[in-house]
Amino acid sequence: MSPPQRRSPVPPDLMDEILGEILLRIPPEEPAHLIRFALVCKPWLRVLSDPAFRRGYRERHRRPPLLGFVHNLYENGPIPRFVPTTASRCSSPVFNCQNWWALDSRHGRVLVNRFEPSDLVVWDPVSGDQQHLPLPPYSHAYDTGAQRPILVVFVGTDDEEAVTWASMYSSETRGWSAIATADFSASTMVDLHSYIETKPSILIGNALYFSVELGKAILKYDLAGQGLSVIDAPEVSKQMRILMAVEDGGLGFAAIEAGVFTIEIKSEKIKKVGKRGGCYAVLPYMSFCAP
């Protein structure tokens, strides 16, 4: 009787490929699972930290999960706070300061306005990286806009000159575009002295939309043409309204007076989250969180 034949060991490259295919199927809604797998052994950490795995993970799941949200509270000054909605390694040491105001969140980054000194900061809650941007060259500017991975749109009002304006910063050119101004003459809801709210803008198509004076009007910034236009909002009784994108690519309004809630669309489960207080602006934070 011949001895049993020994099976050839699986090549390390093939093992990594098989392991990677398994790990790709881990749902992104619970990023803590990936971190636990990374702690198992060095080969697993090598697979998870490979840029090719991260790229494939994003391509497979496409839409990043909601990891938490940032909101500004009026407690001894405007203090932005990060509230996690799932177990992740996101942290918020950058927000432990009264001189910060969270403006927007897109593509895994948060745009923050810093007051002392005065500048803009693009913050990555997962990596902790910060990129500081200078303010655009315009006097008496105080209201700000929204952030994209490469572009930052700054919208402001000048009380002395009664001008609403916008400029776009590009990380490629490291400079600001020419100033664009808004014409309020056709509006029946707002005028030249109206202010732009420091709430998240909405990106629909190739345009950003900002709320003007408690939602009385909408300011549209065309990213391609770099122009501003004013749209009167429908008359409704609710105040403190927020803009929102709807499924068909349109623009809508939402309002709530009882606090901050998360709503699961499929199950229709509603959960109150966050801290009580004077809440102003809620910024959902969505990102893939890999080791």
Image (cartoon, rainbow, N blue to C red):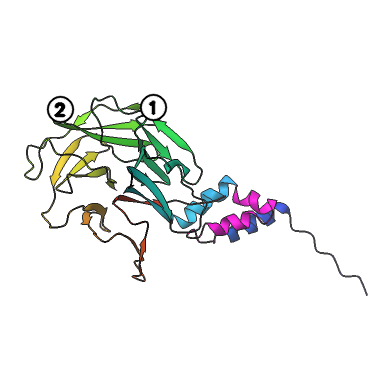
Exactly how many numbered labels are in the figure?
A: 2
> Which residue occupies 85% across, 67% down?
5
Indicate yes or no whether the magenta region holds residue 30: yes
Residue that sits furthest to the right in the current view = 1
Query: Which structural element holds mark 1?
Result: loop
Indicate yes or no whether the magenta region holds residue 140: no
Is 104 in front, or is 281? 281
On the image, the x and y values in percent for residue 17 come to 64, 55
Q: Nearer the viewer, mark 1 or mark 2?
A: 2
Task: Quarter of the image for the N terminus: give it.
Answer: bottom right
Is 281 in front, or is 22? 281
How many residues crowd mark 2 within 10 Å: few (<14), some (14–19), many (20+)?
A: few
- Identify residue type, mark 1: Arg
> Which residue occupies 45% across, 41% down?
94
Q: Is residue 259 above or below residue 193?
A: below
**Lateral position of residue 101 relative to residue 33, left or right:** left
**Lateral position of residue 183 relative to residue 221, left or right:** left
Residue that sits furthest to the front in the current view = 76
On the image, the x and y values in percent for residue 12 come to 72, 53
**Lateral position of residue 122 relative to residue 162, left or right:** right
Quarter of the rendering containing residue 77: top left
Quarter of the rendering containing residue 35: bottom right
Q: Which residue is tagged 1?
A: 174
Q: Which range of residues does the magenta coloring cover? A: 24-49
How many residues crowd mark 1 within 10 Å: few (<14), some (14–19), many (20+)?
A: few
- Identify residue type, mark 2: Glu
On the image, the x and y values in percent for residue 121 come to 39, 36
On the image, the x and y values in percent for residue 268 come to 33, 70
Query: Which structural element holds mark 2?
Result: loop
Which label sits on residue 160? 2
Residue that sits furthest to the bottom in the current view = 1
> Which residue occupies 23% across, 34% down?
156
